[in-house]
Image (cartoon, grey):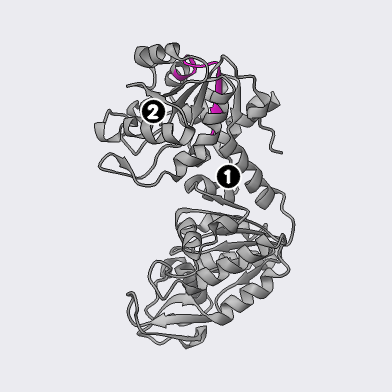
């Protein structure tokens, strides 16, 4: 199914290789504040350079909307990238045209060049064929290592892939292999853990997963919408009154598919949402009108643990409570630790993704114990929704022609 080429299939010595990376990292005052994404891209760039390739790296940064915005230049990232790959990184003031072409022509075997922000050109987000041709003109081979941008059909993620021999980089390869194993061809029983604030942002996700999993665990504020849909009084809790029917539809789909939906049976409530607020833990049907549900309780964690003992694969997106504000992190942390323990024991394949999810797993100290943690936000969600990702499809088309 994953018929895409990898770096193992390429002869790169002496060749110019255009690598689409994701260097859209957090920055403040021109300084990178979190280099996680750079660190994930470094192995592909380093391996290609070590094999004698002339590596040309392109990426978007922020949202300049097709105009040159100096504060959104990739220039400040050249230094951190050089540190991550262990060799100098040159910088070109444009990603296409004479400046980029001259910089690419100067490269020697094993050298690395970083191009300016692809989104400084309006044609990038429009997937303009002419911009794709200009990018392709820089190189002999195209490698996409930016899974997090693969859900966008842009010139640098999709267009150029049809114009050059192409392959997946190491980060993209790892992402595709783990996601395919977790969702497309999982060892069963399969459990999906879906949390977060709103049902409305995850309708397609829930409707896809409920047909594919044995267990669907729903937590966070979106669980309140499901509880309300079943007639439970949720007090002042955040929930979406206009999506009760959506929740009922997902419940009906679970009946059709035979999936079990796990909702909280006990909850941690408070009268105000703030750090250190006074709380009580109660059965889910005893929420007072002036209280709000902010976490799952120990009985819900126990039910999760019991279901987990027979589960072989877990996909996780979203926290089970308001984890950023103590003491409402306990349910998410406890559940994450249970998944981590079974993963470390070799009894579970666990794949997680999404910004809040990664933060929650880091808080629990278990991100390194999951089988795979994706740093891709939108692309990870769209994959879980069952959608085709243009950047991935472009790689696979090359392989199957």
Q: CA distance from mark 2 to mark 1?
A: 25 Å
- Name the residue located 51 percent from the left edge and 83 percent from the top edge: 284
In the rendered image, the vertical position of residue 106 relative to residue 357, given as above or below: above
Secondary structure beneath dot 1 equals: loop
Tell me how many marks there are.
2
Is 248 in front, or is 204? Answer: 204
In the rendered image, the vertical position of residue 277 relative to residue 21, given as above or below: below
Residue of label 1: 387
Magenta region, residue range: 135-145
Q: Is residue 249 visible?
A: yes
State which quadrant residue 299 falls in: bottom right
Is 214 in front, or is 21? Answer: 21
In the image, is 97 to the left or to the right of 69?
right
- Name the residue located 64 percent from the left edge and 47 percent from the top edge: 178
Secondary structure beneath dot 2 equals: helix
- Quadrant in the picture for the C terminus: top right
Q: Is residue 385 visible?
A: no
The circle on residue 118 is 2
């Amino acid at each position: 199914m994953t018929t895409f080429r990898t770096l193992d299939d390429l002869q790169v010595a002496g060749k110019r290789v255009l690598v689409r990376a994701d260097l859209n990292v957090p920055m403040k005052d021109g300084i990178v504040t979190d280099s996680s994404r750079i660190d994930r891209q470094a192995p592909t760039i380093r391996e290609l350079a070590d094999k004698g390739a002339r590596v040309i790296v392109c990426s978007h940064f922020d949202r300049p909307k097709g105009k040159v915005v100096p504060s959104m230049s990739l220039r400040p990232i050249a230094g951190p990238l050089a540190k991550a790959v262990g060799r100098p990184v040159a910088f070109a003031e444009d990603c296409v045209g004479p400046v980029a072409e001259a910089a690419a022509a100067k490269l020697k075997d094993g050298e690395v060049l970083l191009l300016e922000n692809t989104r400084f050109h309006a044609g990038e987000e429009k997937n303009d064929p002419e911009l794709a041709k200009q990018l392709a003109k820089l190189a002999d081979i195209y490698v996409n290592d930016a899974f997090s941008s693969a859900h966008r059909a842009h010139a640098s993620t999709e267009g150029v892939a049809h114009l050059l021999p192409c392959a997946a980089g190491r980060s993209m390869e790892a992402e595709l292999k783990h996601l395919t194993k977790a969702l497309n061809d999982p060892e069963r029983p399969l459990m999906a853990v879906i949390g977060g604030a709103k049902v409305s942002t995850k309708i397609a996700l829930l409707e896809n997963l409920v047909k594919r999993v044995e267990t669907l665990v729903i937590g966070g504020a979106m669980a309140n919408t499901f509880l309300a849909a079943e007639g439970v009084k949720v007090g002042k809790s955040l929930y979406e009154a206009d999506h009760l029917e959506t929740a009922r539809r997902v419940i009906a789909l679970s009946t059709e598919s035979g999936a079990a939906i796990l909702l909280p049976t006990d909850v941690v409530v408070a009268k105000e949402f703030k750090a250190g607020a006074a709380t009580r833990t109660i059965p889910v049907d005893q929420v007072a009108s002036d209280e709000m549900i902010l976490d799952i309780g120990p009985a819900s964690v126990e039910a999760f643990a019991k279901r987990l003992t027979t589960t072989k694969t877990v996909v996780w997106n979203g926290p089970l409570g308001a984890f950023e504000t103590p003491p409402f992190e306990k349910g998410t942390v406890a559940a994450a630790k249970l998944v981590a323990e079974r993963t470390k024991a070799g009894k579970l394949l666990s794949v997680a993704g999404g910004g809040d999810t990664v933060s929650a797993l880091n808080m629990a100290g278990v991100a390194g114990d999951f089988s795979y943690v994706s740093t891709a936000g939108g692309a990870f969600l769209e994959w879980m929704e069952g959608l085709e990702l243009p950047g991935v499809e472009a790689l696979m088309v090359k392989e199957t022609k």
